[in-house]
């Protein structure tokens, strides 16, 4: 079993940067594909980015070129570097770990982009 804890959210001005962290506990975290998803009020959950155990990445169209996902296997942590943020990036950001039929979610961290 894997437990996920997100951190790093907060209030940031448009054009600014923020780094989110997803720290995992439990064994075999390195075999999981990990993703960041977000959900804004009244909207469906949206893919932000994913990273495979081997480091292959995938991004949602709305964040390509602005956000970067990375992982540190030794620290069991996945990061989301958010640059040039926009008000439409405001949402609760959730971390997800998936492997075969195993699927785990964190509680989420709020990101608010506002001046």
Image: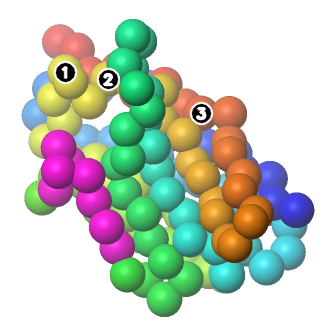
Q: In screen coordinates, is 93 left or right of 114?
A: right
Evaluate if marks 2 and 1 touch, with contact meaning CB atoms under 8 Å apart.
yes
Q: Is residue 19 visible?
A: no
Element at badge 2?
Answer: loop
The residue at the point 55 percent across, 64 percent down is 34
**Spatial separation of the CA atoms under disc 2 and disc 1:** 6 Å
Q: Is residue 87 above or below residue 15?
A: above
Label 2: few (<14), some or many (≥20) within 10 Å? Answer: many
Quadrant of res 45: top left
The residue at the point 44 percent across, 71 percent down is 51
Q: Quadrant of the N terminus?
A: bottom right
Q: In screen coordinates, is 79 left or right of 115?
A: right
Considering every residue shown, the one lying at the far bottom of the view is 54
Residue 61 is inside the magenta segment: yes
The residue at the point 32 percent across, 23 percent down is 90
Front residue of this view, candidates 76 and 40? 40
User: Is tag 3's residue or tag 2's residue first in the polypeptide sequence?
Assistant: 2
Element at badge 1?
Answer: helix
Numbered circle sitting on residue 87: 1
**Spatial separation of the CA atoms under disc 3 and disc 1:** 18 Å
Q: Is residue 10 above or below residue 56?
A: above
Numbered circle sitting on residue 108: 3
Most common secondary structure along the magenta stretch: loop
Quadrant of res 31: bottom right
Evaluate if marks 3 and 1 touch, with contact meaning CB atoms under 8 Å apart.
no
Residues in magenta, as a range:
57-64
Front residue of this view, candidates 52 and 67? 52
Label 1: few (<14), some or many (≥20) within 10 Å? Answer: some
Element at badge 3?
Answer: loop
Numbered circle sitting on residue 90: 2
**Spatial separation of the CA atoms under disc 3 and disc 2:** 13 Å
Numbered circle sitting on residue 14: none
């Amino acid at each position: 079993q894997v437990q996920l804890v997100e951190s790093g959210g907060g209030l940031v001005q448009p054009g600014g940067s923020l780094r989110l962290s997803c720290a995992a506990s439990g064994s075999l975290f390195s075999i999981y594909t990990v993703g960041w998803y977000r959900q804004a009020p009244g909207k469906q959950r949206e893919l932000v980015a994913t990273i495979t155990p081997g480091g292959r990445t995938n991004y949602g169209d709305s964040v390509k070129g602005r956000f970067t996902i990375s992982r540190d296997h030794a620290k069991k942590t996945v990061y989301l570097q958010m640059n040039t943020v926009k008000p439409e990036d405001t949402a609760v950001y959730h971390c997800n770990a998936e492997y075969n039929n195993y699927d785990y979610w964190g509680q989420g961290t709020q990101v608010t982009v506002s001046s």
